[in-house]
């Protein structure tokens, strides 16, 4: 303890920070992880004066209520990892705290997981454009896993502001009124996952490819069958190049999947994972076979290829 007491405040602060840093998408604070606050007055003062110690409030609103008041200018990792949280402690104080962080443009990551759509909406609301002074320049990742049967509307989140640092976007069971918003407000995405829910307007292939074109550094793309539909005016021959793509996951009907693949000029060493749903037995060899044969013939590396078929009748 004599040696520890001689450590410079910068070193102590870095040790404290490492003890409470977000380590994965939905990390939680381990019990007693902030007990260093109670060792002595000096340690408490060092912690309170180290902004990075307060960049992660925990993964539930109970911890948020306890720790948000110490947060200042450090980039915030806002995490909700409690699937069964009932919203009982999400109050006006937390709304004000979230609104303040959004206004200061100090939110780095937003990772929300819940089985309660209302709770997710309560959290997103203070962060949207409807809240005066909201800024979004610091947001690097937005992951929303909604396990409620009803979709969450995230339209306001993308309605008025650009996201110049947003690299990762995952939407599961969400609504968005205009897919053109994603194409016009994101430019540096490296990972895009769209597993949306009805009755959200479904993106057309052209809208989806506009998103690809505005984010040329995409390395991973994952799309469900409900995330894309054929353009009403018919498919054009316009192709989009994604030279950095490393992994492509597609789930849906063979017509939409193959139609999208034929217009996507991706490197042949990409990991390709296709899940086809609601197809007849003849759909697979007729529509998927020729593309996969060409893909395998052109591949230039030890890439992975996965194909799972869920026909309308019978076994996989």
Image (cartoon, helix red, strand yellow):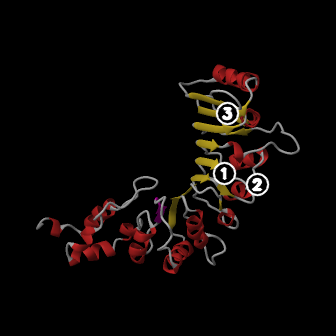
Q: Nearer the viewer, residue 304 or 17?
A: 304
- First reached walking from the N terminus: tag 2 or tag 3: 2
Disc 2 crowd, CA 10 A, few/some/many (<14, 14-19, 20+): some
- 288 up-or-down from 64: above or below: above
Report the side of 81 relative to 123 (left or right).
Answer: left
Span of residues in magenta: 76-81
> Between marks 2 and 1, how big is the CA–CA gap?
10 Å
Taking the view exactly as shown, the residue that stands out farthest to the right is 233
Question: Which residue is rendered at x = 76% and y = 54% of the image?
Answer: 201
- 294 up-or-down from 99: above or below: above
Residue 192: x and y in percent read 61, 48
Question: Which residue is rendered at x = 65% and y = 43% of the image?
Answer: 223
Residue at label 1? 196
Q: Nearer the viewer, residue 309 or 291?
A: 309
* Mark sitting on residue 201: 2
Q: Nearer the viewer, residue 8 or 307?
A: 307
Disc 1 crowd, CA 10 A, few/some/many (<14, 14-19, 20+): many
- Looking at the rendered structure, the secondary structure element under dot 2 is loop
Dominant SS of magenta comes to strand
- First reached walking from the N terminus: tag 2 or tag 1: 1
Can you see residue 291?
yes
> Between marks 2 and 3, how big is the CA–CA gap?
21 Å
Question: Which residue is rendered at x = 66% and y = 74% of the image?
Answer: 130
Question: Which of the image's four quarters has the N terminus?
Answer: bottom left
Residue at label 3? 276
């Amino acid at each position: 303890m004599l040696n520890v007491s001689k450590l410079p405040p910068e070193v102590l602060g870095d040790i404290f920070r490492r003890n409470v840093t977000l380590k994965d998408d939905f990390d939680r604070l381990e019990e007693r992880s902030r007990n260093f606050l109670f060792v002595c007055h000096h340690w408490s003062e060092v912690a309170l004066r180290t902004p990075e110690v307060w960049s992660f409030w925990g993964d539930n609103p109970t911890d948020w209520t306890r720790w948000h008041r110490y947060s200042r200018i450090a980039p915030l990792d806002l995490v909700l990892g409690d699937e069964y949280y009932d919203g009982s402690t999400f109050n006006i104080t937390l709304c004000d705290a979230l609104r303040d962080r959004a206004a200061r443009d100090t939110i780095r990551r937003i990772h929300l997981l819940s089985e309660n759509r209302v709770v997710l909406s309560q959290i997103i609301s203070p962060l949207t454009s409807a809240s005066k002074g909201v800024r979004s320049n610091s947001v690097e990742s937005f992951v929303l896993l909604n396990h409620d049967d009803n979709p969450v509307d995230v339209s306001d989140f993308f309605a008025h502001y650009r996201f110049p640092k947003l690299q990762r976007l995952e939407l599961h069971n969400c609504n968005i009124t205009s897919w053109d918003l994603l194409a016009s407000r994101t430019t540096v995405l490296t990972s895009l996952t769209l597993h949306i829910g009805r009755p959200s307007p479904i993106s057309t292939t052209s809208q989806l490819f506009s998103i690809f074109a505005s984010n040329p550094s995409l390395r991973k793309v994952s799309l469900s069958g409900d995330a894309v539909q054929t353009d009403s005016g018919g498919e054009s021959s316009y192709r989009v190049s994604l030279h950095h793509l490393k992994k492509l996951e597609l789930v849906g009907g063979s017509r939409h999947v193959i139609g999208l693949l034929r217009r996507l000029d991706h490197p042949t060493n990409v990991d390709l994972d296709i899940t086809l749903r609601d197809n007849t037995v003849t759909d697979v060899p007729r529509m998927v076979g020729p593309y996969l044969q060409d893909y395998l013939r052109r591949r230039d590396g030890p890439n992975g290829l996965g194909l799972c078929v869920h026909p309308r009748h019978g076994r996989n």
